[in-house]
Image: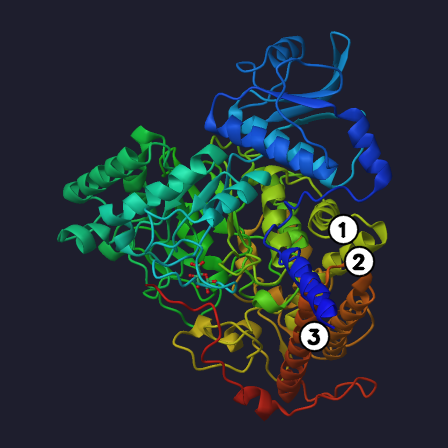
Amino acid sequence: MKEKYFVFCFLLISVASHAEDGYRLWLRYDKIDDPITLKEYRNNIEGIQFNSNSPTLGIAKQELINDLSSLLDKKFTDQKTIADKFIVAGTPLTSAIVKTFFSAYNYNLGKEGFVISTKNINGKNLILIAANSDIGVLYGVFEFLRLLQTHQSIKKISIASIPKIQNRILDHWDNLNRTIERGYAGISIWNWHLLPGYIDKRYIDYARAEASVGINGVVLTNVNANSLTLTSEYLIKVKALADVFHPYGIKVYLTPRFSAPIDISKLKTADPLDADVQNWWKQKVDEIYSYIPDFGGFLVKANSEGQPGPQTYNRTHADGANMFADALAPHNGIVMWRAFVYDVRVQKSTENFGEGKVDANALTIASADRAKQAYNEFKPFDGKFRKNVLIQVKNGPIDFQPREPFSPLFGAMHQTPLMVEFQLTQEYLGQATNLVFEAPLFKECLETDTYADGKGSTVAKVVDGTTENYSITGIAGVSNIGNERNWTGHPFGQANWYAFGRLAWDHDLSSEQIADEWLRQTFSNDTYFVDAVKKIMLMSRETMVNYMTPLGLHHIMGTSHHYGPAPWIDNAGRADWNPVYYHRADLIGIGFERTKNGSDAIGQYASEVQKQWEDINTCDERFLLWFHHVAWNFKMKSGRTLWDELCYKYYSGVDSVRWMQKTWDDLKKYVDEERFEQVKMLLAVQEKEAVWWRNACLLYFQTFSKMPIPANYEKPDHDLEYYKSLKFPYAPGIGGNL
Ligand code: BDP
């Protein structure tokens, strides 16, 4: 009896110590479980030569040695003499072989690119991981390890890779008290209180994960900014993080609060044209660089949602951005100035459509449609910004909705570099309870043609500088990371972090490839499993659009926390905070008329783009209610009426979630118990939420359409009043500006 008890305890302990809690992300490097692949790798890798003379190369070398030893279950060390079947890694400065290789082949690798190549040199078959820079070698090592973890053949490799976008940045909306604005995975991983003395191992693991997908910048603090961040007390803490990140090729950025000169030094004004204010920022920036010589620069949210900014002093966005740019320029720092502006000062009238007009001097914008505001505020200033300013534009014109058309600013600014900003944290996409793989959303935006410079001027090509010739380029993702053990709350949230990094490096990668490689590294290389879960991932975003905001609906979530449906809200502080403002349902129909007959937001796009959406009869139905107010009995392409189509979409969204659940259930034997159960439970929550969305929205819209939900569909299990009565005072993600 006793013996049995001990065996049981031992089993428990050994299971627990191997539990897959998700902490390791896609960097697991367990022994290759496929004997044929393992044999191939063992036969082709005999040793490693890796001279390192810098912290970055030291990290790269350790990563390669440790992970290879683990993957192949064979001990590797760094060897002095090269023999057949060796991996040789380094730069021309650290390896004679790499030097000769680079002089024989002409690679244009820039500052961060790398080559992985199988070559016979002096009679020896070698695998070269080579770059001009130390960081390029680290990126190359991670790419090589990705090949092994995804079981690719390594007999013949010829990869030359350079990032398409220069600044690949993760934006944390983390507050100093560790709450996270729109964070759903615990509190901030930055432990400001214990910094700089205590360096949590998690900072290193974080930097490693970032570098493994090529992310090279981190904005540490919330765009709704706190001036304290810029005090010496906090800058010392920032420096401690920067020191950890530096060898991983990651620069840190901060979010300066525009009023910091007043808040910190009691200046009388923060007017960007005031000499004392300019001087204050110059000195502050010099001080930052004295702590952090490779500081990246600033991300600024100004005159938006209550943040102070240049307009507070009747100055322009250009005046504000240029003030920071001048202070940062001597240190090669950049300013990322956000275009997400819709100041509370701006007057709104829900009736006054079609009158979007800009008076840049007076700074009054009469735009009845929030979708037009970023364009109206920034277009007039094209060319007015300093060279080290980028305008950071959300992917769509409103706000990280499940589906939006691309922002009309892309392609409209020919002399000002634009960054695209995506949101990895799923504020409007089911938060951390819904499985939604966002790569298809990112790709949909990146691949859309702006026609800015004729056909083929996709958003990706605008952003990567191809069509507009930008000298600086950038892409940003709002982080979904918190201190939960698995980093992102939902295990599949990790895939969005991964996908963002991979696409930031190479936006030509397909969603399918990204899902495939993420699954292989994170879960299993079993093809049956990978193919099945890939299907779930690839359909997940469309599924969510269907049960939340089909056919171009948008922003009908619960006010403030944005959790769950609340299309009926009509009493929020300003018109454009209300769902009714966006869907405009009435007895005739539903949708926001943004053609010439309405707000004419469509007029902000190139004429070729307008043609795709302006005619109600030919408009892409995915955007129909975004651009048109459509009658309930309008005939859709399917032959159904609009009302029936809406019902069909909502019901098929729920059906798809049920299909996802069933598919996942059948995969039990391929997944460790911990993550299997976690995903299973979350899918059950998602199913409940999808049903809630469907029922609440259809019952509400039905009060206008007066049409029945087709009889063959399951009946809503509650009435509209019930859904309206639900309240979520403690929904996560609204930490506030602290
Ligand atoms: C909105 C969020 C808000 C952010 C804002 C932003 O609801 O919390 O501060 O975006 O991007 O989507 O600044």
Asked whether the residues under the numbered discs 2 and 1 touch, taking CB atoms below 8 Å apart as contact, a structural biologist would say yes
**Residue 459, percent across and down?**
59, 44
Q: Which residue is mark 1?
A: 524
Q: Residue at x 69, y 41 (%)?
A: 509
Q: Quadrant of residue 181?
A: bottom left
Tell me the kind of residue under disc 2.
Tyr
Tell me whether the residue at label 2 lies in contact with that at label 3, contact meaning CB atoms closer than 8 angstroms: no
Determine whether, in the image, residue 300 is placed left or right of residue 596.
left
Tell me the CA gap for discs 2 and 3: 19 Å
Task: Using the image, tell me which numbered label, if any, was put on residue 670.
Answer: 2
Residue 255 screen position, x and y as percent: 35, 49
Disc 3 marks which amino acid?
Ala
Q: Residue at x 50, y 84 (%)?
A: 727
Q: Quadrant of residue 663?
A: bottom right
Judged left or right of residue 154, residue 412 is: left
Quarter of the picture containing the C terminus is bottom left
Marked residue nearer the N-terminal end (2 or 3) = 2
Residue behind mark 3: 684
